[in-house]
Image (cartoon, rainbow, N blue to C red):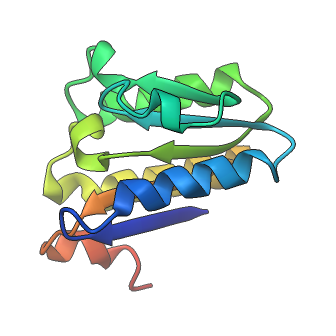
C-alpha cells in the first residue's frame, strides 16, 4: 500500500508525517524506516525509527533510488513501514518518472508487505495522478 500526503509548501506535511511515523511505531510489531534529505528531524522521531539520510548516498536517478529502496527492504525482513519525506528530492525523480516510480513502489509493497508513506509538494503534472485513475 502506498499513502501520499500532498500539499502546498508550509502546510504541515512533514509535521503530519512525523506524527504518523511516531504513532505507527507503537502499533506495529516490525520495524519502521524514515528516509529524509537530512538529519534535521532526528530528535522529533521515536528512537525506534531508523532514520536514513538519503543525501549521504550517491543516488542520481529513479532506478538507483528504487535499487536503494530494494536494498533496505532486502536487509530487514521485519520491515513493515517506510516513510519518505521530500519524495522528489530524495528520489532524484523527474516529474514524468513519478508514475513509473509509484508503480514500482506498489509492486515492492505488495511483494514484501511493506507499506510506503510519503509527502510531496503539490504537483500540477498529469503524470502524477495517471497511476491512480485505474
- Tell me where residue 25 appears, x and y as whole percent: 73, 45
Left or right: 111 as drawn, with respect to 119: right
Residue, x 35% and y 29% (percent of image)?
Answer: 40
Rendered view: 132 above or below 6: below
Asked if residue 60 lies left or right of residue 24, the reply is: left
Residue at left 56%, top 37%? Answer: 45
Question: Which residue occupies the extreme front position in the image?
Answer: 43
**Residue in the picture at 71% in, 30% down:** 48
The residue most toward the bottom is 133
In the figure, 29 relative to 110: above or below?
above
Q: Nearer the viewer, residue 31 or 133?
A: 31
Q: Is residue 15 visible?
A: yes
Q: Quadrant of the N terminus?
A: bottom right
Vertical position of residue 12 compared to residue 105: above or below: below
The location of residue 14, given as percent across then percent down, is 38, 54
Residue 46 image offset from top left, x and y in percent = 64, 36
Nearest to the observer: residue 56 or residue 98:
56
Residue 100 lies left or right of residue 47; in this view the side is left
Furthest residue toward right = 29
Position of the C terminus, as image quadrant, is bottom left
**Which residue is depicted at the point 87% across and 42% down?**
29
The image quarter in which residue 96 lies: bottom left
Amino acid at each position: 500500500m502506498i499513502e501520499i500526503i500532498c500539499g502546498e509548501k508550509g502546510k504541515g506535511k512533514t509535521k503530519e508525517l512525523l506524527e504518523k511515523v511516531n504513532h505507527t511505531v507503537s502499533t506495529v510489531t516490525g520495524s519502521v524506516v524514515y528516509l529524509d534529505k537530512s538529519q534535521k528531524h532526528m530528535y522529533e522521531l521515536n528512537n525506534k525509527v531508523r532514520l536514513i539520510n538519503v543525501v549521504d548516498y550517491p543516488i542520481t536517478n529513479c532506478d538507483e533510488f528504487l535499487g536503494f529502496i530494494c536494498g533496505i527492504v532486502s536487509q530487514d525482513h521485519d520491515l513493515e513501514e517506510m516513510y519518505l519525506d521530500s519524495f522528489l528530492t530524495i528520489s532524484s525523480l523527474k516529474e514524468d518518472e513519478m508514475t513509473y516510480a509509484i508503480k514500482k513502489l506498489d509492486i515492492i509493497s505488495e511483494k514484501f508487505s511493506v507499506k510506503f508513506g510519503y509527502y510531496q509538494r503539490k504537483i500540477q503534472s498529469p503524470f502524477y495522478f495517471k497511476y491512480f485513475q485505474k
